[in-house]
Amino acid sequence: MTASTTRTYTIREVATLTGLPASTLRYYETIGLIEPVSRGASSGHRVYDETDLDRLTGVACLAAIGLSIDDMRTYVGNSRLGRDGAREQIDMLTEHAAHLAREAEFLELRRAYVGLKTDYWRAVAAGDEVRADQIGEQAHALAGQIRSRENH
């Protein structure tokens, strides 16, 4: 009979593999987002196993898509419920997708504004005052749209 060995990881290795800084890993454990990690018998250092790594990889993905800590907690909790948590997962992720779509629209407005300002300065550099004035008016109108979205 052979003894099975489970691969373990240091906090530095887990940080590298998940993209989460060690301080964030410790924080997630402290606030209960992840279950407490076992400690080395002699060193007292955190020792992560494959299950911990899988959970943290999932949490890293949630952080990467911009979920709040509260939403990540909800997601992790609902994940444990399986089918019973599915409806809340769907609702939360659908709402988050809509939020990301609004952010993308806002980012596109800002990108368009930068493009107009670049074109404005190209017209100024070329001495084309008429074109610069036209672009300036467009940029002014777009800036108003951006300001109104910022206030909502």
Image (tube, rainbow, N blue to C red):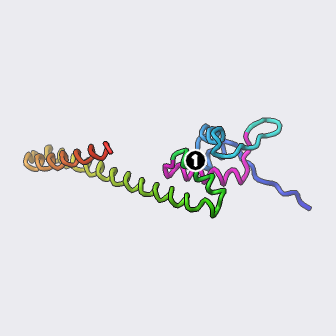
- Residue 63 seen: yes
Residue occupying the point 61% across, 37% down: 23
Residue range in magenta is 46-67
Left or right of residue 32: residue 111: left
Callout 1 secondary element = loop
SS assignment for the magenta stretch, majority:
helix
Left or right of residue 136: residue 28: right
**Picture quadrant of residue 31:** top right
Q: Position of residue 37 (x, y in %)?
A: 72, 43
**Picture quadrant of residue 2:** bottom right
- For the image, the number of numbered tags is 1
| Whether residue 35 is situated above or below residue 45 in the rendered picture | below
Q: Position of residue 12 (x, y in %)?
A: 66, 42
- Residue 118 seen: no
Quadrant of image for the N terminus: bottom right
Q: Is residue 120 magenta?
A: no
Sort mark 1 into few (<14), some (14-19) or many (20+) by Cα contacts within 10 Å: some
Q: Is residue 66 magenta?
A: yes
Residue indicated by mark 1: 19
Left or right of residue 83: residue 144: left
Comparing 104 with 76, the one in front is 76
Residue type for callout 1? Gly
Quadrant of image for the C terminus: top left
Q: Residue furthest bottom?
A: 83
Q: Position of residue 27 (x, y in %)?
A: 62, 38
Residue occupying the point 9% across, 48% down: 128
Q: Residue furthest left?
A: 130
Residue occupying the point 59% across, 48% down: 73
